[in-house]
Image (spheres, rainbow, N blue to C red):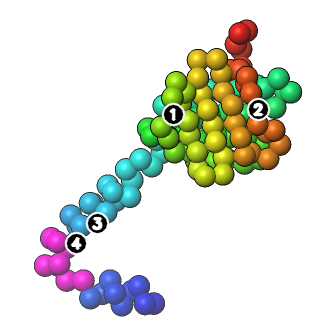
């Protein structure tokens, strides 16, 4: 009933200003919505643990058995490093390493699935 009272107070002369505001708010709220990752790579570690990395502009989403974590890009030498302060992912030409994800044991030498290297 409260909503009906508010809507009844909108006058035709107000619509000229209200419609562009609603369209702008919708455009801002919708920006980035529904955008998927630029790419995804699944990794397997020597002990059989698996995780997937979804690459987004400026960050990655680490999908591991212990959860899903959004990690921001950090500066690192010769590797790409992403972290949220608790979980860290290193990527280089040889594979990936994760730390902080429960059960990950600081995996080293995790390879992309399908890689024979």
Report the disc number at residue 14: none
Report the disc number at residue 18: 4
| Image point (26%, 60%), residue name | 24
State if disc 4 and disc 3 touch (CB < 8 Å): yes
For label 4, the SS is: helix
The image shows residue 91 at horizontal and vertical percentages of 60, 28
| Residue in the foreground of this view, choosing between 49 and 9 | 49
The image shows residue 113 at horizontal and vertical percentages of 71, 20
For label 3, the SS is: helix
Q: Nearer the viewer, mark 1 or mark 4?
A: 1
Q: Which residue is mark 1?
A: 76
Along the horizontal axis of the image, is 85 left or right of 28? right
| Residue in the foreground of this view, choosing between 76 and 56 | 76
Q: Which quadrant holds the C terminus? A: top right
Q: Which residue is mark 2?
A: 107
The tag earlier along the polypeptide, 1 or 3, is 3
Q: Residues under labels 3 and 2: Cα distance?
A: 48 Å
The image shows residue 31 at horizontal and vertical percentages of 37, 50
Report the disc number at residue 22: 3
For label 2, the SS is: loop
| Residue in the foreground of this view, choosing between 107 and 16 | 107
Please name the predominant secondary structure of the magenta segment in the image: helix
Q: Residues under labels 2 and 4: Cα distance?
A: 54 Å
Q: Residues under labels 1 and 4: Cα distance?
A: 48 Å
Q: Residues under labels 1 and 2: Cα distance?
A: 18 Å
Q: Is residue 105 in sight in this rendering?
A: yes
Tag 1: Cα neighbours inside 10 Å, few (<14), some, or many (≥20)? few
């Amino acid at each position: 009933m409260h909503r009906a009272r508010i809507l009844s107070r909108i006058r035709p002369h107000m619509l000229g200003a209200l419609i562009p505001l609603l369209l702008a708010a919708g455009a801002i709220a919708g920006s980035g919505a529904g955008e998927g990752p630029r790419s995804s790579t699944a990794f397997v570690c020597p002990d059989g643990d698996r995780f997937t990395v979804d690459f987004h502009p400026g960050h990655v989403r680490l999908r591991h058995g212990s959860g899903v974590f959004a990690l921001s890009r950090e500066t690192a030498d010769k590797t790409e490093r992403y972290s949220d302060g608790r979980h860290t992912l290193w990527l280089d030409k040889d594979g990936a390493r994760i730390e902080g994800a429960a059960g990950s044991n600081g995996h080293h030498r995790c390879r992309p699935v399908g890689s024979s290297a």
